[in-house]
Image (tube, rainbow, N blue to C red):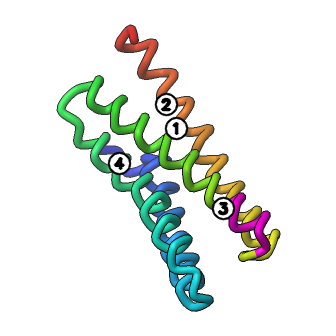
Amino acid sequence: MKEDNIIQKKSYAFALKIVKLYQFLKEIKEYDFASQVLRAGTSIGSNVEEAIGGASEKDFLNKLTISYKETREIRYWLRLLRDSDIIKNDLANNYIADSEELLRILGSIQKTMKSKIGR
């Protein structure tokens, strides 16, 4: 594995931020949101890790596709938290910007892999 794997680093950093958001949501007794945010936000990086260890290029692409879908899901939860005034706009927008960056990176990797394996 490359030491400069950008999606691995960014998805891990995002997961750390999500853990902090999870803790905050629990403090304000938003338990249902907290569990959804933790699950979706941390699964991005775990699926990236699985992709890196994939048995084939197709396996790699499948795991990255799951990461992409989980990133879309966390973006949904973050918008919902923002628009329902559970978390402040600035905080939510920071998380949303991070998720959109992950989406761009994951989407680009998916596009490259699809053309490479002819899918």
Q: Earlier in the sequence, mark 1 or mark 3?
A: 3
Q: Earlier in the sequence, mark 4 or mark 3?
A: 4
Q: Is residue 39 above or below residue 59?
A: below
Q: Is residue 91 above or below residue 79?
A: below
Q: Secondary structure at mark 3?
A: helix
* Cα distance between the residues tagged 1 and 3: 19 Å
* Cα distance between the residues tagged 2 and 1: 5 Å
* Cα distance between the residues tagged 4 and 2: 14 Å
**Residue at numbered disc 1:** 106
Q: Earlier in the sequence, mark 4 or mark 1?
A: 4
**Residue at numbered disc 2:** 109
Residue 78 badge: 3
* Residue appearing at x 76%, y 62% in the figure: 93
Q: Is residue 118 above or below residue 105?
A: above
**Residue at numbered disc 4:** 47
How packed mark 1 is, by other alpha carbons closer than 10 Å (few <14, some 14-19, many 20 or more), is many
